[in-house]
Amino acid sequence: MNRRRFLHTIALSGVAATAARVPLLGAGKPLASPHSTLLAGGGNPLRFPPEWKGEPLVAAQTKQNVWSDAKTDLWTIGGSWPGPTIRAKRGDTFNARLVNMLAEPTIIHWHGMIVPHEMDGHPMQVVGTEGTYDYSFPILNRAGTYWYHPHPHHRTAIQAYRGMAGLFIVEDDAEKELGLPDGEHDIPLALQDRRITASRQFTYEVVTDDDHLQGFLGDTVFVNGTPDPYLEVAKGLYRFRILNGANARIFYLSFTDGRPFHIIASDGGLLDKPYSVTLLSISPGERFEILVDFSGDKIGTSVMLRSENTGAGAGYPPPQGAELPIIRFDVVKEASKPFTIPQTLVPYERYREQDAVRERDFVLSIRHEGSVGNLEVGHFINDKEFEMERIDETVPMDQLEIWSFRNSSLAPHPMHVHGVQFQVLDRAGNANLVPRDRGWKDTVLVLPYQMVRVLVRFNRYPGIYLVHCHNLEHEDHGMMLNFEVKENSTGVDVGPNRPQKLDLN
């Protein structure tokens, strides 16, 4: 039977129940939690990936002490998990060489970065074993927390799961003038989950119905590659750069004591002002920067950052929305350098709906055939699975458009657009955006049966780019399209009132 014509509603294997547990959370009161259980964790000091010094980025299989008592098989970029943290300043030119020593093709995508299409890490650019790929592009992005990961079609999920990902931090003068926490008070937190065997290995087998429909969920959370982590902090203000680098899991972040924290940045850098929240959802591919104040904590006390329970039941692996410990913070000393929360951050120009010249629809769907426990699953955008050579949309350069992501499935889809930073226009028809939807974005979570509209304009580079779900199992199984940005396109007459170019400042 043709899978494309065999459409079921996805109300099986717990998927329908799970779909009800994926709210969008930008603020609110955390649910009650057993503090003693969560605070008992935190057995390993938080590790930090090395800083990149310009050496070739070698993709290779390695063995590392993720735990002190065992060597774990990993696939890494640059020899560490996560890969080395790249730091660059806006206006600089980034140069790097990928060397592929894996037994299969790979390529690096610079997630969130505005780069020429030949530098973007499209799967058509993969290099084979012992092959190399040279990257060179100017840093156009605002200061922010970006990242890199592999992007070969059908193999993105397993390569990222095995360890191939790292942070890419951009700095600029506007950020520096704000006096935000720096040095030991500026902490990256790369969140990932994995399924662990008794011998301390990562297992990855997408075999169950839920694995196909929901994506591959782990049983253990890692922060910067550290299991069960803790971080000793001073009585002061900290900046945490949070990346959700998981394949499929959405984290619902809150502190066990319910304390507020401030969102100061999203995918594409700083917001216009800090936003106080007590709960923050972050889907795969997204980044947020938050300020957390420990100045009121007594020395010797601890608090846990967790992914709180949104109504999930028990299960293995823990289902989407289950409560999970993330990292424990131990307050151990007085602060040596005072920091304060700024009243304002960096203003940015807002796109306006009335300036958009057209709207494109992207309908997200999941289809399956077969019986429970033996499903064949397909993931679609506009009723199409990804084909490498097919151009699905032609987008005129420098044209402001509305892209509408319509989720017709029971699974959430974090939608990522390459080559651009966009702005959320509305969610389910509501233009009163929660803090997590504000600012510049490159990834937006679209909940089941919801529509999210974004304002997007490609004003830098022509070429072929991708739009796809950043649930990596969904992406690898087809929920991805090519679009081509073309200069002087006659596809749409933008007329004399075309929007002006916007510098991402």
Image (tube, grey):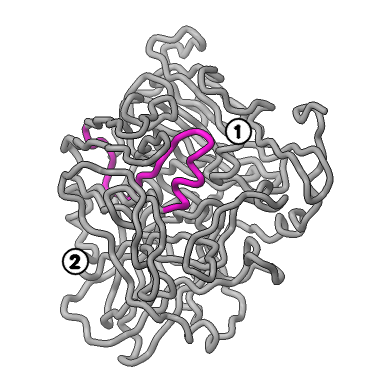
Residue toward you, 135 or 332: 135
Point 17% across, 35% down: residue: 93
Residue at 19% across / 66% down in the picture?
183
Residue 156 among those drawn in magenta: yes
| Residue type at the position of mark 1 | Gly
Identify the image quadrant of the N terminus: top right
Q: Is residue 484 visible?
A: yes
Q: Residue 174 versus residue 7: which sits nearer the camera?
A: 7
> Residue, x 76% and y 43% (percent of image)?
375
Locate residue 231, reporting x and y percent: 33, 77
**Residue 502, percent across and down?**
33, 30
Q: Which mark is residue 478?
A: 1
Q: Is residue 472 left or right of residue 441?
A: right
First in residue order: circle 2 vs circle 1: 2
Q: Quadrant of residue 23?
A: bottom right
Q: Is residue 221 above or below residue 386?
A: below
Residue bearing mark 2: 183
Tag 2: residue type? Gly
Q: Residues within 10 Å of mark 1 (few under 14, many from 20)?
A: many
Where's residue 145, x and y in %? 32, 51
Q: In terms of secondary structure, where does tag 1 sit?
A: loop
Residues marked 2 and 1 touching at CB (< 8 Å): no
- Asked whether, in this view, residue 93 is left or right of residue 274, the answer is left
The percent position of residue 492, horizontal first and vertical second, equals 51, 12
